[in-house]
Amino acid sequence: RARDAIAVLDTSGEPLAVGCRARPNWAKPNAVEAKELVDTALDTDKEIRRTLSEIRSMGPELVLMSLDSRAAAIITKQGTWFGHAPHIQEVSAVGAGDCLLTGAFCSWLRGEPAKEILRWGVASGTAAALGAGSAMPTRTAVEAVINLVVVTPL
């Protein structure tokens, strides 16, 4: 950040806490990492919203949180959104979180709003889970599921 680079934080534990205080552009915890960071449950929409807000208040401009294989949530200055993945026959979840981050980040680089950033992220993670291994899905694979992703305000 000090050199005008884009900073994306995808880690856990103490590095996540310290990294958030360094004010990265992004932080991408999963549910376990987020619960550990702010010591809260994620059982309700209110708890998810509060957790996202608490993490964002630590420094990141945007927080993208993967919740499980079916959902993710995002908070930015534009608002807070919840993304529901379509029901699929999962082949492998290996790398799906990384694909969630990559798809969302590409959308952000295109200047899309938070709702679409989350939609592209969830679609990318879903498309990844449809394939074997940890390879990034093709854009065609992501586009095949993107309209099945439901994004709602949180």
Image (cartoon, rainbow, N blue to C red):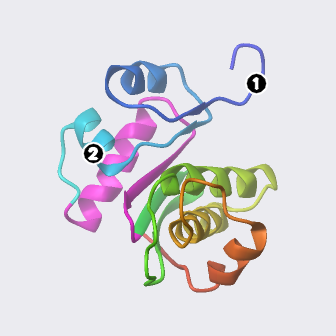
Above or below, 100 against 21 in this view is below
| Secondary structure category for the residue under label 2 | helix
Q: Residue furthest right?
A: 110
User: In the image, 151: left or right of 119?
Assistant: left
Numbered disc in front, either 1 or 2: 2
Q: Position of residue 106 (x, y in %)?
A: 74, 53
Q: Which residue is mark 2?
A: 32
Residue 80 part of the magenta segment: no
Q: Which residue is mark 1?
A: 5
Mark 1 and mark 2: Cα distance apart in space: 28 Å
Name the quadrant of the C terminus.
Answer: bottom left
Give neighbour class at mark 2: few <14, some 14-19, many 20+ (Cα, 10 Å).
some
Q: Start and end of the magenta stretch?
A: 43-70
Q: Nearer the viewer, residue 15 or 132?
A: 132
Question: Which residue is found at the position 41% from the left and 42% from the top?
Answer: 29
Q: Is residue 153 above or below residue 125?
A: below
